[in-house]
Amino acid sequence: MIKAIRGTRDLLPPDTDLWNRVEATVRDLFARYSFHEIRTPVFEDTQLFSRSVGEDTDIVSKEMFTWEDRARAGSGGASDAGLTSGSGFGGGSAPGAGFADGTGYGGGRGQSLTLRPENTAGVVRAYIEHQLDKVGKLQKLYYIGPQFRRERPQKGRYRQFYQIGAEIIGPSSAGSESPARDAEVLEMLATLLDELGLRGWTLQLNSVGCAADRARYNQALRDALKPVVATMCADCQRRAETNPLRVLDCKVPEDQPIIENLPKISEYLDDACRENFAQVRAMLDAVGVPYTINERMVRGLDYYTRTTFEFTHGDLGAQSAVLGGGRYDGLSESLDGPKAPGIGFAIGEDRLILALQAEGITADAPLDAYIAPLGEGMNPHALKLASELRRAGVRADLGDGTFRLKKSFEAAEKAGAKYIVIVGGNEVQSETFTVKELGTGKQELVARANLAEYLRRSH
Ligand code: AMP
């Protein structure tokens, strides 16, 4: 039997009903905040991620699905060949191999491609590529889609997972740098979780300052780590040299007491960043969004500046972060784009669903009616009735005339229908149908003209 690959999974009903409810709520709410959808490719140039997320992050150094793509023949059918060449991710084929094989695909060098591990980099790449800065207004963009990281799979952590994210990005003159945007995004997230009915969340907030603050903080960390780093894990030892901030991402239990005693970022913020963070907090207080300050929370991506945040949920165990995000004021420039400060977040949709389910929240959309034809000859009539009812907004399932009445009732129960509607010759002739409520056994004759309204009463 061929099975789904480790770390990937099938989403099945009734779970998918909840996924759809979440996504419908998200789309409706984001529209109220004037966000519009963006869809970027699932794979991108590897450099996009190494230059934005950062070489020393777990994501880039260990978790990306990267492959060397040899489809460089330009336009035409042959250019698909590299995708089906079977070289796989991290497989043995050497980059550039196969070019001299005489198939005619060659002529170019292999290009390193990566399945997107996150979507902010792709959005900012699209912002730059399509010169969205020229529009002169803030871009408020959201996405919903799969992301890929080669992590050790466990509950709430998958190799293909889904993120719902949004970004506000634009020229400073359009107000993209304002702390009001940070507060607006955080208030929107609190409203979203409230509208979904989720209760047990906590907003953890921090400021990682601007590039200059972080340079000073990194130096302070480097100095503080020097006498102790030899006892720490291999990742910390490497990062203490290359990117000490990333030491704060370490999850190794033995390293935690050392990390707790390291200098705090708040001591290294300049006046402007300190003031900016104070304004974000004041606006959250004004709008009544509760938060706790967590100075360890520097987030596992290099592009963040100033405000960073995570929403956690108590029922999620080790993988408690439902969503994370922050400001990324230098990201566009680091990808050769114009100055375009921005702030965004990504919700882990898989974890959001787990949190909702842990709180007993489902997305029941019960079936209104099961249409049961009495005998094969009634199939066309039943189909016609079902068509009428469905067009009138009734959620209806259709049986089969070969079923005996008893089997139809069983099927209706299994389908979770509220009513069963019997379609026999007499009913069709008289334009009046026997409708039975399955829960109570109550039975009524209902005229065809009134039937849709009768069945929809339960909505
Ligand atoms: P990040 O892009 O790392 O800031 O992650 C944002 C959110 O995506 C996290 O808070 C998680 O909810 C979710 N997430 C990240 N990695 C995974 C994963 N491997 N499996 C499931 N959800 C994930």
Image: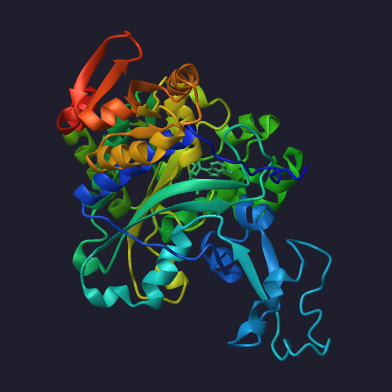
- Judge by depth and name the residue closer to the eye, 226 or 64: 64
- Judge by depth and name the residue closer to the eye, 38 or 316: 38
Q: How is the image coloured?
A: rainbow
Q: Horizontally, is 108 left or right of 213 in the view?
A: right
Can residue 459 be seen here? The reply is no
Q: Residue at x 50, y 26 (%)?
A: 403
Residue 24 lies, in percent from the top left, at 32, 43
Q: Horizontally, is 18 left or right of 45 in the view?
A: left
Q: Is residue 168 above or below residue 188?
A: below
Q: Is residue 57 above or below residue 354?
A: below
Residue 418: quadrant of the picture? top left
Can residue 346 be seen here? The reply is yes
Q: Is residue 149 above or below residue 412?
A: below
Q: Residue at x 84, y 65 (%)?
A: 92
Q: Is residue 333 above or below residue 73?
A: above
Q: Residue at x 76, y 61 (%)?
A: 90
Q: Horizontally, is 37 left or right of 261 in the view?
A: left
Image quadrant holding the C terminus, namely top left
Residue 167 lies, in percent from the top left, at 34, 56
Q: Residue at x 56, y 25 (%)?
A: 317
- Judge by depth and name the residue closer to the eye, 171 or 429: 429
Residue 315 lies, in percent from the top left, at 49, 22
